[in-house]
Image: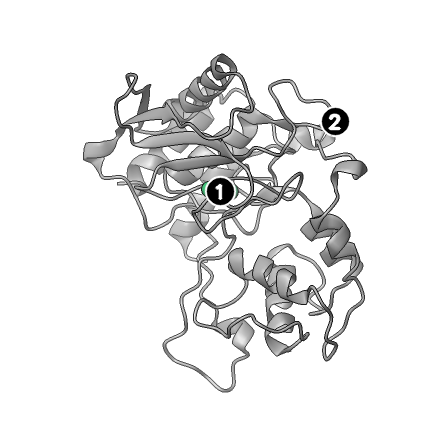
């Protein structure tokens, strides 16, 4: 890793360390882990060479998160083929699991953890294929740093937001309060300012809840698994899965709306998921297990420097 990137990552981690919250991880109760999780459990132990109905859904899941090359094969079969094995190895490496290429228990368990729907890996195909290098290593994994290439120009650092007319899940006053707090968190550590747009006006950021397929190629999946997503600059869309059990004071079977909002705003501002440090708030799998702490002055100034050096 280049020194600059290393520095960036360290800075991000200092700011977003949530080690102290590990004991407060919140997960769904088993009865809410229907569908995708039970589906995953049914795939455990399937091996390369087998054809099993449902493997195509697993392939689509991995592809959506960036574990297939964008120019790779079409996912039309339910064969456990070389491409799936490769995608699984990439997934396992990303989450620091044993890189077996198999659907082993630890891999299935990792996939069952509720998460953000945005990709972990932004793939660009290799321009110089090398027969001595495995396909696995040809992936250009833009995951070691937190800032992506899509940014808001300095002329757009004063962002406006509004609430869309999607599914009504949380009371409008509650959602307004949660989002206002989450935006203030980012305003403290970035050059951005955020203001709710006046009624009827357009806005840079639009926040709303949706259920299932809602037309942006990132369908939600019912309770559990994908909880929310937000698109990189200058898209501005932040979507929550309306089928989750959201709360501002979550019990064990609920998800914390504010911490998920803070994570997703990170994407709106141009942050990608961070690979090597699952404790960072911008990791893909930390949704629902993160709470916020007040940034102390030192961390705040560190993050401010980070933004000013790299987000412009
Ligand atoms: Zn995310
Ligand atoms: Zn969406």
**Closer to viewer: mark 2 or mark 1:** 2
Q: In terms of depth relative to the viewer, which is nearer, 297 or 73?
A: 73
Q: Under tag 1, what secondary structure?
A: helix
Query: Against 159, is 124 above or below?
Result: below
- Give left or right: position of 50 versus 193: right
Q: Position of residue 46 (x, y in %)?
A: 78, 69
Name the residue located 55 percent from the left edge and 28 percent from the top edge.
259
How far separated are the C-alphas under marks 2 and 1?
31 Å
Name the residue located 50 percent from the left edge and 75 percent from the top edge.
73
Q: Position of residue 165 (x, y in %)?
A: 42, 27
- Give left or right: position of 177 versus 103: left
Within 10 Å of disc 2 (Cα), the crowding (few <14, some 14-19, many 20+) is some
To which residue does mark 2 refer? 252
Residue 10, labelled with which disc? 1
The image quarter containing residue 258 is: top right
Q: Position of residue 212 (x, y in %)?
A: 56, 43
Q: In terms of depth relative to the viewer, which is nearer, 93 or 88?
A: 88
The image quarter containing residue 278 is: top right
């Amino acid at each position: 890793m280049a020194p600059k990137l290393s520095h960036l990552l360290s800075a991000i981690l200092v700011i977003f360390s949530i080690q102290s919250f590990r004991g407060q991880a919140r997960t769904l109760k088993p009865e809410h882990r229907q569908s995708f999780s039970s589906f995953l459990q049914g795939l455990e132990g399937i091996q390369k060479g087998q054809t099993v109905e449902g493997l195509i859904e697993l392939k689509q899941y991995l592809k959506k998160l960036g574990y297939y090359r964008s120019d790779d094969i079409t996912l039309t079969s339910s064969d456990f083929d070389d491409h799936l094995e490769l995608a699984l190895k990439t997934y396992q490496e990303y989450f620091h699991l044993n890189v077996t290429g198999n659907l082993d228990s630890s891999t299935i368990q990792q996939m069952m953890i509720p998460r953000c729907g945005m990709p972990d890996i932004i793939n660009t195909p290799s321009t110089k294929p090398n027969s001595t290098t495995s396909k696995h290593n040809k992936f250009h994994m833009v995951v070691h740093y937190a800032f992506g290439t899509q940014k808001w120009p300095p002329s757009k650092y004063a962002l406006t937001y509004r609430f869309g007319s999607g599914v009504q899940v949380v009371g409008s006053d509650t959602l307004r309060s949660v989002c206002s707090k989450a935006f203030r968190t980012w305003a403290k550590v970035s050059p951005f300012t955020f203001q709710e747009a006046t009624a009827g006006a357009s806005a840079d950021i639009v926040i709303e809840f949706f259920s299932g397929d809602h037309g942006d190629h990132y369908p939600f999946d019912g309770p559990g698994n994908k909880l929310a997503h937000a698109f990189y600059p200058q898209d501005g869309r932040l979507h929550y899965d309306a089928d989750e059990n959201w709360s501002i004071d979550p019990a064990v079977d609920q998800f914390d709306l504010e911490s998920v909002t803070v994570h997703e705003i990170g994407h709106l501002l141009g942050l990608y998921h961070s690979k090597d440090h699952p404790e960072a708030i911008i990791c893909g799998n930390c949704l629902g297990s993160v709470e916020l702490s007040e940034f102390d002055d030192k961390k705040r100034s560190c993050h401010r420097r980070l933004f000013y050096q790299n987000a412009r």
